[in-house]
Structure formats: structure tokens, C-alpha cells
């Protein structure tokens, strides 16, 4: 499902126009993005948690030159689904 399909489904499920659904989805994603950029986690009960995690610095090798290099530490977003969110066959 892509963003357009998500908006269509939200519009149908909530019985609102696509314009309202678009604004709602965009606002929700903006709030989640802002919180994550500020280093906060976002917990949606019954769905899951969006977390900011830190990846530590690590050593590597440039495959072209064979030269040793350092991959800097960085932050990344992780999603941990709720126990209620189960995908069954």
C-alpha cells in the first residue's frame, strides 16, 4: 500500500473527503516525523512504537582501494510492532 492508497482507505473508512483524509494523513506523518527528529519516541497503543536508536561508530574497508575507514555513529528510526498487531496467514 502506498501513501495515495492509504489516503483513499482513510477517506473511505472515516467517511470523509479525500482532501480531509489527505490533510489528516499528512498532519499525522508530520507530527511523527517532528517527534522522531527531536529524539522522542512515538507510541501508538495497539499499533506499535517508533523509536530513535543510535548506531555506534564502526570500522570498515573501502572495497575499491582496500583502505581502512571509519563509519561514523548515526541515529536511525526503528519500529517495534505491538503484540496486538499480528499478521496471520
Image (cartoon, helix red, strand yellow):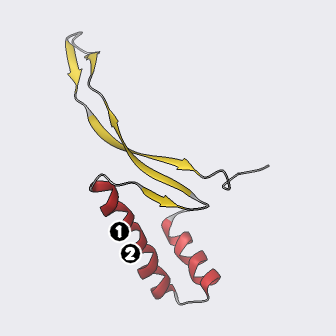
Q: Are marks 2 and 1 in contact (CB under 8 Å)?
A: yes
Image vertical order of residue 64 relative to residue 82, above or below: above
Q: Residue at x 47, y 87 (%)?
A: 20
Tell whether 74 sits left or right of 85.
left
Give the numbered dot on residue 27.
2
Q: Most extreme residue toward the top, as rendered?
A: 66
Q: Residues within 10 Å of mark 1 (few under 14, many from 20)?
A: few
Q: Residue at x 45, y 53 (%)?
A: 50
The spot of residue 47 in percent (x, y) is 59, 59
Image vertical order of residue 42 relative to residue 80, above or below: below
Tally of numbered discs: 2
Query: Who is closer to the viewer here, 84 or 88?
Result: 84
Q: Residue at x 56, y 70 (%)?
A: 5
Query: Who is closer to the viewer here, 82 or 4?
Result: 82
The spot of residue 57 in percent (x, y) is 26, 25
Quadrant of image for the N terminus: bottom right
Image vertical order of residue 56 relative to residue 33, above or below: above
Q: Which residue is mark 1?
A: 30
Query: Who is closer to the viewer here, 15 or 40?
Result: 40
Image vertical order of residue 27 relative to residue 15, above or below: above
- Helix, strand or loop status at disc 2: helix
Give the CA distance from mark 2 to mark 1.
Answer: 5 Å
The spot of residue 46 in percent (x, y) is 61, 61
Q: Residue at x 42, y 71 (%)?
A: 28
Tell whether 77 sits left or right of 83.
left
- Helix, strand or loop status at disc 1: helix
Q: Residues within 10 Å of mark 2 (few under 14, many from 20)?
A: few
Q: Quadrant of residue 30?
A: bottom left
Amino acid at each position: 500500500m502506498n501513501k495515495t492508497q492509504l489516503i483513499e482507505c482513510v477517506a473511505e473508512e472515516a467517511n470523509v473527503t479525500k482532501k480531509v483524509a489527505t490533510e489528516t494523513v499528512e498532519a499525522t506523518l508530520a507530527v511523527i516525523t517532528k517527534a522522531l527528529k527531536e529524539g522522542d519516541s512515538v507510541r501508538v497503543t495497539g499499533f506499535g512504537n517508533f523509536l530513535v536508536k543510535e548506531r555506534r561508530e564502526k570500522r570498515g574497508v573501502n572495497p575499491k582501494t582496500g583502505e581502512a575507514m571509519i563509519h561514523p555513529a548515526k541515529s536511525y528510526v526503528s519500529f517495534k510492532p505491538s503484540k496486538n498487531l499480528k499478521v496471520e496467514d
